[in-house]
Image: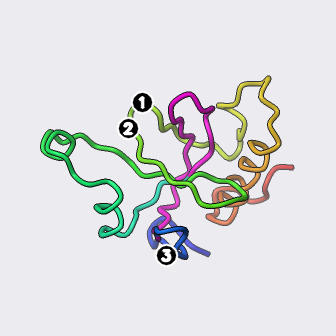
């Protein structure tokens, strides 16, 4: 099993490959709902090519974090502000950030994948049902 201290490389997806960091989070992008994700690091060359540094964002210490969203389709990455739209994911309370009225099948599947990843990382002895 992988661990947070030794990130495992991910197969290239689209034009990116990344190292998963083993930190599960809830991430929010724009008007989309909160979604389970894992913090990751893109390969540096790919990161700079995809998100070229600008004078403002790099010189002022403007920090962002890269997340890999859990879903059953193509890998989706996002670059987000860690202090406003990234919160810890609690595998023992997997629906903590979910609007009770949101019963999306895709969101339920994403949460199940996040809980399975948490169990794989050793955060849960037995995944909840």
Q: Local crowd at mark 1 within 10 Å, few (<14), some, or many (≥20)?
A: few
- Residue 25's disc number: none
Q: Is residue 107 above or below residue 23?
A: above
- Left or right placement of residue 104 versus residue 34 in this view: right
Give 4 or 111, whichever is nearer the viewer.
111
Q: Are marks 1 and 3 in contact (CB under 8 Å)?
A: no
Write the start and end of the magenta stretch as one range: 17-37
- How far, Cα to Cα, is label 2 from label 1? 6 Å
Provide the residue designation for mark 3. 9
Q: Is residue 25 above or below residue 116?
A: above
Q: Are marks 2 and 1 in contact (CB under 8 Å)?
A: yes
Label located before the other in sequence (2 or 3): 3
Provide the residue designation for mark 1. 84
Provide the residue designation for mark 2. 81
Q: Is residue 25 magenta?
A: yes
> Residue at point 71% right, 38% down?
93
- Left or right placement of residue 105 versus residue 52 in this view: right
Q: Is residue 10 magenta?
A: no
């Amino acid at each position: 099993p992988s661990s947070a201290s030794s990130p495992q490389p991910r197969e290239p997806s689209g034009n990116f490959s990344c190292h998963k960091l083993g930190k599960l989070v809830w991430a929010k992008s724009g008007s989309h709902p909160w979604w389970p994700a894992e913090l990751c690091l893109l390969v540096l060359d790919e990161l700079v090519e995809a998100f070229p540094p600008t004078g403002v964002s790099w010189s002022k210490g403007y920090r962002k974090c890269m997340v890999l969203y859990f879903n059953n389709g193509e890998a989706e990455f996002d670059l987000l502000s860690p202090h406003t739209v990234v919160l810890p994911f609690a595998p023992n309370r997997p629906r903590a950030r979910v609007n009770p009225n949101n019963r999306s099948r895709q969101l339920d599947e994403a949460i199940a994948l996040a809980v399975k990843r948490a169990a794989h990382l050793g955060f849960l002895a037995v995944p909840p049902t």
